[in-house]
Image (cartoon, rainbow, N blue to C red):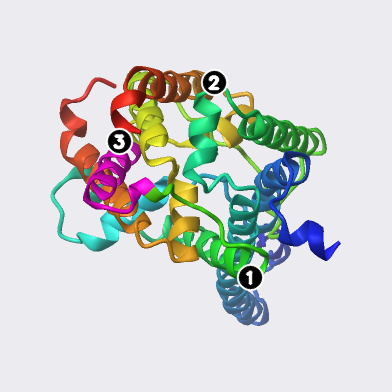
Amino acid sequence: MTDFILQPWPWWFSGPLIGSAVPLLYLLAGKGFGVSTSLQQLGALCSPGSKLAYLKNYDRRQGAWTLVLALGIAIGGFTGSHWLSAEPIEFLPARFFGVWGAIKLFIGGILIGFGARYAGGCTSGHAITGLANLNPPSLVATIFFFVGGLGVTWGLGHILF
Amino acid sequence: MATINKTTVTPTPTSTVETENKTTAQSSTSTADAAMVYATTLMVGTFLGILFTKSEVVRWQRINDMFLFQDSHLYLIIGSAVAVAMLGMFIIRKYKASDIYGQPIRYTPKPFQKGVILGGTTFGAGWAIAGACPGTIYAQLGSGVGLACFTGAGALAGMYLYALTKPHLPH
């Protein structure tokens, strides 16, 4: 049992539990599971005098929970990697430790932040919550998440990775 | 909460006092509700953070292996997560379940617009390059992965880029 917990968890254990977070968050907090709105929340909080409509018209109070969710995920990350793992988790391959690696992560981050907000959601809001609620635009979004990911991996992978 | 308001019908002085008392009680419960929302959100977030880490979806290599079709792990995780979430939402809809605060649970559908395609593709590219999505960036940061600061800073910069260019982008 302890051994099971300390090893990486199989998909049939972690996948269904991740999925259960969608109805759980609705039942316990009345919120729809989605992570990328927290970026908009952060932007709106960090630039209170912004003239950009996207940040100016954003309801910071209504969206405060998104940062609490993000904080929880960070705490969970710490718990999972420091207390529930027998061996250190290799988050990034060794070749990322350097200037070029940092630049790649930053560029990837820009695409993540820009794309997720432009699409109106990310893997959690569109692919998991959206699909679970049979929302057709979320299926389109999920398909194009893979179009972008597969395109970069197969088209530019030999240069980037 | 709505039922409390309905009970006070007769406009006698005593009932006015009663209404006032009830209003204060009501506002204090809604503050308690707000605190409860944050507490439960933090709990669900922690639950997810542990799952993201222990299922290894936080690992760059897992994302890369998924896009290279070398590993079914992530497809099975996403697939089973969607299936369970779908079942949960089906049950919630079927029994018209309310949340623990008595509010009806309603999914707000994300609308279709061109960004779903253009932004979706952009997001996917970033997912493959950085090997992370917004949820797992927070999990990496919490785990103390220093390099994740670059991914996180990039994501924030990307959000600002969208805020800046939104009026000029096709939607």
Residue type for callout 1: Pro
Residue A154: x and y, percent? 40, 19
Taking the image as shown, residue A89 lies to the left or right of residue B88, namely left
In front here: B166 or A123? A123
Taking the image as shown, residue A64 lies to the left or right of residue B171, namely right
In front here: A156 or A47? A156
> Can the viewer see residue A58 in this picture?
no
Residue type for callout 3: Leu
Q: Write down the region rendered in magenta.
A: A95-114
Quarter containing the C terminus of chain A: top left
**Chain on which label 3 sits:** A
What secondary structure prevails in the magenta region? helix
Residue type for callout 2: Leu
Residue under numbered circle 3: A111
Q: CA distance from mark 2 to mark 3?
A: 20 Å
Say which mark, if any, is on residue B11: 1
The secondary element bearing badge 2 is classed as: helix
Residue A102: x and y, percent? 27, 50
**Chain on which label 2 sits:** A
Q: Residue at x 35, y 38 (%)?
A: A112
Q: Are there few (<14), some (14-19), or many (20+) residues within 10 Å of tag 2? A: some
Say which mark, if any, is on residue A139: 2
Dot in front, 1 or 2: 2
Q: Residue at x 77, y 33 (%)?
A: B87
Residue B32 vs A73, above or below: the answer is: below
Single out the residue that lies furthest toward the front.
Answer: A94
The secondary element bearing badge 3 is classed as: helix
Q: Are there few (<14), some (14-19), or many (20+) residues within 10 Å of tag 1? A: few
**Chain on which label 1 sits:** B
Residue A120: x and y, percent? 40, 34
